Image: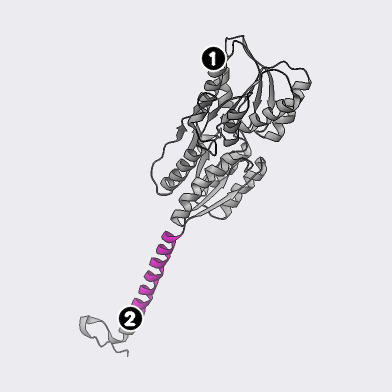
Amino acid sequence: MVSTTKGKGGIPLRTRPILAAAALLLAAGLAAVTHQAVSQADEPLRIGTTYMTMNNTFYTVINDEIRKRTDDNGDVLKTLDPALSIRKQCRQIETFIREDFDVIVINPVSGNSRMLDSALKKARAHGIKIIAVDSQVKETKNVDCTIVSDNYNAGVLCARNMMKNMSEARIILLRHWNALSVKDRYQGLSDTIKGRPNYRIVEQVETLGQTEIAMPKVQEASRNGIDFNVVMALDDQSAIGALAALDSQKVGKMVRVYGIDGSANMKKLLSSKDDAWATVAQSPVKLGEKAASISYRLVSGKKVPKKIIVPVHLITKENIDRYSIEGWQ
């Protein structure tokens, strides 16, 4: 027969050591859970960035603004360069998923890519917040927030300045068609000159937004006898390539070159070269600041706007003295 002698509280004496051991195990378990929760809370935020190319200081500046915020907070920023390859960019997104990043900031190589849409959809299903910066993606449902310049107005500003200074224009258009932001710029330009036959596009050239592609393409257009008096470059890198081409060809006539970005190099050329006529200034500083701020708001569970549009402004020979030519605005 087993003794059931009871102590105070009616608990059998033989049961007390068992209960004491159980209490110790429970306390240890709670401590472990608490430690784990604290550890998770203390884990740094992980932001992954991928821009269409790092061969452009515009994206370096955006990234630097994000880095300032992550460095201040002791968080992690990992930046990957797809070098204008959409396949490579999609693999980079897979890397961010595999390494459990919290946020992906993407400047898409191609905004129309179904492969990219699929990669972003997978990232969101994994719980990663997605921010598109500088250029949008077509399938916005896969993106939490899009942060872009007023690209349509950039095209409008270029067109209006051209019409103000010229009674007619025969335009070579330098474009980067994979970037939906560039299509918005084109639309602003096209809508503004529509119904005005004195202003017409005589040639369109794909440059991928690269100086080293734009220069030989403009040289070729000149050698082929294309009659033009305006180069409308929808980014500054291409505008700089066009200016170099005109220098090398010695065209012997005034050709006005427009750009969009407001880069330091283009602003310097506005101050020193007759053919450099204007650039529409974006602010990669503001784009980067907003991307950083939205990243932290998203992971904190706060509401953010679906789209943020940053204003642009025209820089010309007439107002260049109001701006620093040493960097970005």
* Numbered tag placed on residue 20 in the rendering: 2
- Residue 263 placement: quadrant: top right
The answer to whether mark 1 and mark 2 are in CB contact below 8 A is: no
The quarter in which the N terminus is drawn is: bottom left
Q: Is residue 294 above or below residue 185?
A: below
- Residue in front for this viewpoint, 39 or 185: 185
Dot 1 or dot 2, earlier in sequence: 2
- Residue in front for this viewpoint, 103 or 264: 264
The residue under label 1 is 164
Q: Is residue 176 visible?
A: no
Disc 1 element: helix
* Numbered tag placed on residue 104 in the rendering: none
> Magenta region: which residues?
18-45
Disc 2 element: helix
**Quick one: which residue is furthest to the left in this view?**
8
Q: Position of residue 227 (x, y in %)?
A: 72, 15
